[in-house]
């Protein structure tokens, strides 16, 4: 797949995947996001950077939370926001994706935020649009969800600034998770020396070790002495066929309970990209406990998405 | 050309600022030079409510330049409402940074007044804005770039580059 997200000067022109993004750009996005964290704490939670620009959220697949955070991010940058749930509109009348996009370009859209259940949809649109229009991938199939990956590493960096000394464990449905791939790329690019994945064999992609991770099938071994635990959602709606005996069985083996959390370092943080399945991958006592940073992740997600939009709208410079 | 000593200018504007301080005064430094100057003033005048601003998100040249450098987080922890704000910058030139900083400041609340203090006014204002407290006035050509820097001991230095 062509990676058209950098222009000829190496500046960001679209955000499609974390794969292949240089450390410099990831760091630039995270540092810029620090600025936007403060904006949300002020009286007036808005800056005028994208005043007069139009951001279009095209969601070919439903995701209320992701769409809402992108919408808030764009609005805090003073952009005008249009939300399109294409699944329910013209596509069902037979229009192609690129025709939909061309119509929105004719309405002078400056930026697209794209969510699709097919890998590569955002790439396709990015290669199609003129130079002055940017595309952000808000999740495509099993492939990537770069802003989620970035907000997760931003959260890690805020709580554990010394990234070169961290042991991070991703737990759960790695196979169906687009977040997992984005997270692994971002963590290794920023120099995290040890990334572990903990999952049953049926929920691991083939050749997962090639991503530079250590593989565990047992929570007790995998969680030992980790600094960060990133839980993944059990993607039941994406699961075809019976890969697991039952949700209760899964919880017994791979659910994060206070007892299993105790195996990690005492100051370890617990993350989850949401929406959570309480009692399936995570125990409520952990989700609501003092080591949980699940809600700060949501707050930081807006700052990170503002940073990506601000950098893209400014020509990537 | 002979440049003034920034350390002398600093004591000069510190004295001018001191005469304006009352219970409702707060200092705000504009990144990066204005923040260095403010920190030096605070060591001389003691603890006064203070904060920092990076006006990058409010600049009028964002459409042309983008976010050229990574902006620094603004940090204003006191209530701006009703305060007499002394805005501190290193070099006053076109006035566009001041305009952007004032816009950002008003998103934190409504100050009672805003005063602009700078180390050097190099002339060339493009907006109806002028500093009230000035260390020195210099006349420079538009291709000359006047820069304040800070060494590892916190001392300030001035330099000119010809573009």
Image: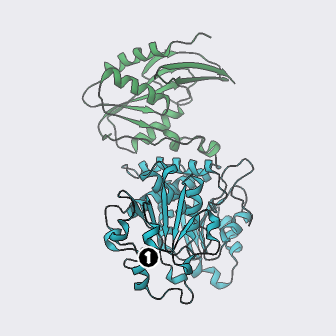
Chain colours: A cyan, B green
Query: Residue at position x 41%, y 36% from top?
Result: B52
Question: Which is more toward the observer, A142 or B115?
Answer: A142
Asked whether, in this view, residue A171 is left or right of residue A55, the answer is left
Residue position marked by numbered label 1 in the rendering: A254
Question: Which is more toward the observer, A302 or A230?
Answer: A230
Quadrant of the rendered image containing residue A221: bottom left
Quadrant of the rendered image containing residue A110: bottom right
Q: Position of residue A165 (x, y in %)?
A: 49, 50
Asked whether, in this view, residue B22 is left or right of residue A4, the answer is left
Observer able to see residue A46 = no
Q: Chain of mark 1?
A: A
Identify whether A305 is placed above or below A287.
above
Query: Residue at position x 57%, y 47% from top?
Result: A28
Residue at the outermost top position? B2
Q: Position of residue A127 (x, y in %)?
A: 73, 64
Q: Position of residue A102 (x, y in %)?
A: 70, 69
């Amino acid at each position: 797949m062509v990676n058209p997200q950098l222009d000829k000067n190496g500046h960001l022109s679209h955000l499609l995947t974390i794969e292949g993004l240089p450390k410099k750009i990831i760091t630039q996005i995270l540092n810029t996001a620090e600025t936007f964290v403060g904006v949300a704490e002020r009286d007036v939670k808005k800056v005028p950077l994208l005043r007069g620009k139009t951001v279009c959220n095209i969601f070919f697949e439903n995701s209320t939370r992701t769409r809402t955070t992108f919408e808030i991010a764009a609005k805090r940058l003073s952009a005008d926001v249009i939300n399109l749930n294409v699944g329910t509109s013209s596509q069902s009348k037979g229009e192609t994706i690129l025709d939909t996009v061309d119509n929105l370009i004719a309405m002078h859209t400056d930026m697209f935020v794209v969510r699709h259940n097919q890998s590569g949809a955002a790439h396709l649109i990015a290669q199609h649009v003129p130079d002055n229009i940017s595309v952000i991938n808000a999740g495509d199939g099993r492939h990537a969800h770069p802003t989620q990956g970035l907000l997760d590493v931003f959260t890690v960096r805020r709580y554990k600034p010394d990234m070169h000394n961290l042991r991070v464990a991703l737990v759960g449905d790695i196979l169906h998770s687009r977040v997992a791939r984005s997270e692994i790329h971002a963590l290794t690019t920023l120099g995290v020396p040890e990334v572990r994945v903990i999952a049953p064999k049926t929920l691991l992609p083939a050749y997962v070790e090639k991503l530079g991770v250590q593989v565990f099938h047992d929570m007790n071994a995998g969680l030992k002495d980790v600094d960060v635990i990133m839980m993944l959602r059990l993607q039941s709606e994406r699961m075809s066929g019976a890969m697991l005996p039952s949700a209760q069985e899964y919880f017994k083996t791979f659910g994060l309970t206070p007892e299993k959390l105790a195996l990690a370092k005492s100051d370890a943080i617990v993350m989850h990209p949401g929406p959570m399945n309480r009692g399936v991958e995570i125990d409520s006592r952990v989700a609501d406990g003092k080591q949980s940073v699940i809600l700060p992740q949501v707050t930081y997600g807006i700052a990170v998405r503002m940073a990506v939009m601000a950098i893209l709208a400014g020509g990537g410079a | 050309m002979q440049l003034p000593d920034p350390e002398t200018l600093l004591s000069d504007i510190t004295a001018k600022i001191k005469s304006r301080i009352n219970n409702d005064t707060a200092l705000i430094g504009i990144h990066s030079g204005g923040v260095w100057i403010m920190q030096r003033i605070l060591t001389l005048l003691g603890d006064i409510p203070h904060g920092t601003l990076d006006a990058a998100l409010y600049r009028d040249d964002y459409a042309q330049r983008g976010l050229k450098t990574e902006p620094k987080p603004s940090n204003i922890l006191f209530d701006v409402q009703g305060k007499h704000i002394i805005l501190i910058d290193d070099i006053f030139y076109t006035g566009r940074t001041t305009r952007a900083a004032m816009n950002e400041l008003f998103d934190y609340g409504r100050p009672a007044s805003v005063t602009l203090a700078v180390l050097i006014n190099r002339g060339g204002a493009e907006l109806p804005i002028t500093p009230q407290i000035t260390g020195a006035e210099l006349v420079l050509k538009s291709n000359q770039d006047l820069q304040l820097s800070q060494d590892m001991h916190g001392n300030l230095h001035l330099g000119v580059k010809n573009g």
